[in-house]
Image (cartoon, grey):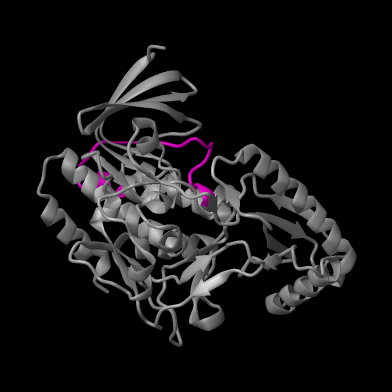
Amino acid sequence: MRPEQTVTAEVLVVGAGAAGIAAAVAASRIGARVVVVERGALTGGKATAAMVGTICGIYLRGGSEARYAMSGFPRECCEQLAGRSGTHAVAGVRGLWFLPYAYDAFEELGTWLLNETGVELRTSTSIESCHAEGDRLVSAAARGRDGLTEIRAASMVDCSGTGLLAELSGAPMIRTQRYQRPAQVFCMRGVRANEESALNMAVNRAMLRADPTGHGSVSVVPGSLREGQVCLKIAFSEQVEEGADLDVLQANGQRMAREMAALLKEGVEAFHGAEVSTVAPEVGVRTQQRAQGRYTLEQEDVMTCRKFADGVANGAWPIEFWGAERNVAMRYFGEGEHYQVPAGALRAATLSNLFLAGRTISATEQAIASARVIGTCLGTGYAAGVLAATAALRKDMDAAIESVRRAQVYI
């Protein structure tokens, strides 16, 4: 089908989650004309649609107070988000720090940042195909409210979470038979509790009584207990198979939320008389297929806190792997330490003008279990946006990499 209109940009960003917002803002700030395509109705990606609730990976582990793992845009974004949410950094187990946030504040901030930097945002729009000439992507066909639009761009940034542009163009992909277990978040109001850790322990005890085999797993989203409302996260008991039907996952998540709410109302005194206020519209799928890059971040890079000459983002979150076992497998590196994500992991292996960010970066399943968190996504998104705009505007790439390092890597 022929497109009904054609739009021209210097940079096309696919996905308006944390990475996509960062990429678009970065590209626009250095002078590129940017178009963002988002399949959902709102900005924020999984941070809003799956109601993640916490920014992980933005702080270094350890210490008596939170210390940022990156400067520049990631820090700027989180400080603004904290102000809009009325939250602050919270200490967790094993020296971890994270930032709780309000879901509506994340969406509002993302939309404001895109508008403030002059980015053209197209929501409720899906990429159906893309066209390449040689080793370059030339255009993508996007279907939205106005029908089919051809978007021609000098550079493209894939922040889809699934390596969509690489897959549509036939570029090499990173796949595995099973991906990490997803999660479903829901919120309840009328909860009679003031202390979050005690409430979480009561929830855990109720789950063990109801499911002594340990297949069920529900926990309080840290920092979410406010004014009688709390959000809870259900961990699916099975990993996601390659090619799984996400609509089926979504239906299962909605069903589990209703069942778990009923169980809590019956088994935990604090939930007597409470009711479900919100169920996240999307399942929190942690990892899916990714594009193969010029470099693939590996588990050893993460665990040895490897630094790269072209390192453009810092990773500070441990490997958090939701495998077949009931409990999440956490692999920690040293307190106060971080690894770097190299620019090569943000560049597609065979397409010279396709850049990768967020959950789409080139990484093994173990490495992405660390690098997928929102804090790191802000960093890889910003870096990919700068690199994409640099390529589109035909500026010096080595100088651009060094500018990103000065902006956010050196802390």
Query: Quick check: 210 above or below 169?
Result: below
Residue numbers of the magenta segment? 25-46
Say whether residue 119 is left or right of residue 161: left
Say whether residue 221 is left or right of residue 139: right
What is the x, y in percent for residue 221?
Answer: 64, 65
The residue closer to the viewer here, 47 or 103, is 47
What is the x, y in percent for residue 376?
Answer: 39, 62
Among the 4 quarters of the image, the one containing residue 11 = top left
Q: Is residue 118 magenta?
A: no
**Quadrant including the N terminus:** top left
**Quadrant including the C terminus:** bottom left
Among the 4 quarters of the image, the one containing residue 363 = bottom left
Among the 4 quarters of the image, the one containing residue 136 = top left
Q: In percent of the image, x 48 and y 66: which residue is there? A: 56
Q: In percent of the image, x 23 and y 44: which residue is there? A: 388
The residue closer to the viewer here, 37 or 218, is 218
Outermost residue on the front side: it is 177
Is residue 159 visible from the viewing direction of this image? yes
The residue closer to the viewer here, 277 or 386, is 386
What is the x, y in percent for residue 55?
Answer: 49, 64
Outermost residue on the bottom side: it is 64
What is the x, y in percent for residue 105?
Answer: 52, 54
Q: Is residue 27 magenta?
A: yes
Q: In percent of the image, x 45 and y 24: which residue is there? A: 143
Is residue 193 visible from the viewing direction of this image? no
Say whether residue 168 is left or right of residue 234: left
The residue closer to the viewer here, 401 or 310, is 310
Q: In percent of the image, x 56 and y 80: which residue is there? A: 93
How many numbered discs? 0
